């Protein structure tokens, strides 16, 4: 299987389960991939490039390890000079930002217990004031979380004060658009939904995620769109409009339409935006 820096770790694992052990052997931060729950949440959302950042290793090192188990990389990546400059500039951004209202959250105990700290972090974000900065203390750089909060209008930076400890800071940037802007792009007009459904005809993949526990519905949908054939759409029976899914679809250039059947049943139609 060929891969590139944007290939998702879940695709590599699906192709060859040795990927888990290979990546885990590089850095202890990757040992969490051995946990089935964390793997289902993280792997579909992390690319090869993201994984290198999480593990604090050069991407070429990770590429070489994957090639050792049979994967073929499209082309070797040379480190950009700006990458080194940016790393130096971001080494101690806290001093530059002059943080006054800091809220700290150490998620290492939660991860060590085998649980996903996402909900705990999002609760902290929900009550975070605009003038406050949230500091997440972790053992690796939380790339999926960074992407998620960036889509909600937060700026972020990362510091590594000591080996094995990563501090990731989040502060609201009011100049950025937020999830509400994404949601405005979602069209819930029944006429448009039905017209688009008719347009795809038999080129529809149908799944039902209503009986799945969180975060399985989102993980399942993201996994399905990874393998969605060109010219096809994904039809999803869901309990509600999945708020956390919207920015993930946005960055992947997917459109979503929805139609509410009742208070506990919403149908979604997800398809590639070919004009993006």
Image (spheres, rainbow, N blue to C red):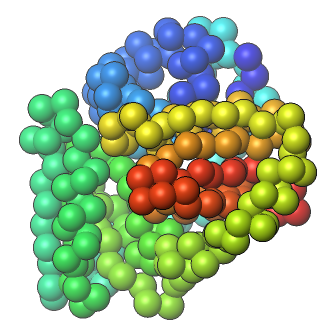
Where is residue 87 shown, x and y percent of the image? 46, 61
Q: Residue at x 59, y 22 (%)?
A: 12
Instruction: Indicate left or right for 242 with 169 as reference.
Output: right
Q: Quadrant of residue 13?
A: top right
Q: Nearer the viewer, residue 141 or 114?
A: 114
Q: Looking at the picture, does residue 144 appear above or below residue 260?
A: above
Query: Which quadrant holds the C terminus?
Result: bottom right
Q: Looking at the picture, does residue 171 appear above or below residue 70?
A: below
Q: Residue at x 82, y 56 (%)?
A: 196
Residue 68 in sight here: no
Where is residue 237 shown, x and y percent of the image? 55, 43
Q: Nearer the viewer, residue 197 or 222?
A: 197
Q: Looking at the picture, does residue 180 appear above or below residue 46?
A: below
Where is residue 166 shown, x and y percent of the image? 25, 52
Q: Residue at x 63, y 60 (%)?
A: 258
Instruction: Indicate left or right for 102 with 252 as reference.
Output: left
Q: Residue at x 50, y 73 (%)?
A: 179
Query: Which quadrant holds the N terminus?
Result: top right
Instruction: Indicate left or right for 108 with 21 as reference.
Output: left
Residue lying furthest front in this view?
A: 262
Q: Quadrant of residue 75?
A: top right
Q: Looking at the picture, does residue 16 appear above or below residue 250?
A: above
Q: Quadrant of residue 260?
A: bottom right
Q: Nearer the viewer, residue 208 or 185?
A: 208
Residue 67 in sight here: yes
Where is residue 106 shown, x and y percent of the image? 13, 54
Instruction: Indicate left or right for 275 with 237 as reference.
Output: right
Task: Report the number of numbered marks.
Answer: 0
């Amino acid at each position: 299987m060929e891969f590139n820096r944007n290939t998702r770790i879940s695709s590599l694992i699906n192709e060859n389960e040795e990927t888990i052990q290979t990546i885990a052997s590089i850095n202890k931060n990757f040992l969490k991939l051995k946990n089935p729950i964390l793997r289902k949440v993280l792997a579909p959302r992390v690319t090869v490039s993201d994984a290198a950042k999480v593990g604090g290793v050069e991407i070429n090192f990770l590429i070489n390890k994957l090639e050792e188990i049979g994967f073929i990389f499209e082309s070797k990546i040379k480190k950009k000079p700006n990458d080194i400059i940016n790393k130096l500039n971001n080494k101690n951004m806290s001093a530059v930002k002059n943080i006054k209202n800091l809220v700290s959250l150490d998620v290492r105990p939660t991860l060590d217990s085998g649980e996903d700290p996402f909900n705990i972090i999002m609760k902290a974000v929900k009550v975070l004031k605009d003038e406050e900065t949230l500091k997440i203390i972790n053992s690796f750089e939380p790339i999926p979380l960074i992407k998620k909060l960036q889509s909600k209008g937060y700026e972020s930076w990362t510091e590594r004060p000591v080996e094995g400890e990563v501090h990731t800071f989040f502060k609201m940037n009011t100049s950025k658009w937020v999830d509400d802007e994404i949601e405005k792009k979602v069209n819930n007009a029944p006429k448009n939904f039905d017209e688009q459904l008719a347009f795809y005809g038999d080129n529809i993949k149908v799944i039902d995620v209503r009986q799945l526990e969180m975060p399985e519905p989102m993980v399942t949908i993201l996994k399905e769109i990874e393998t969605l054939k060109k010219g096809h759409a994904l039809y999803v029976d869901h309990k509600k409009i999945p708020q956390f899914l919207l920015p993930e679809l946005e960055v992947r250039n997917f459109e979503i339409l929805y139609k509410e059947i009742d208070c506990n049943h919403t149908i979604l139609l997800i398809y590639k935006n070919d004009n993006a």
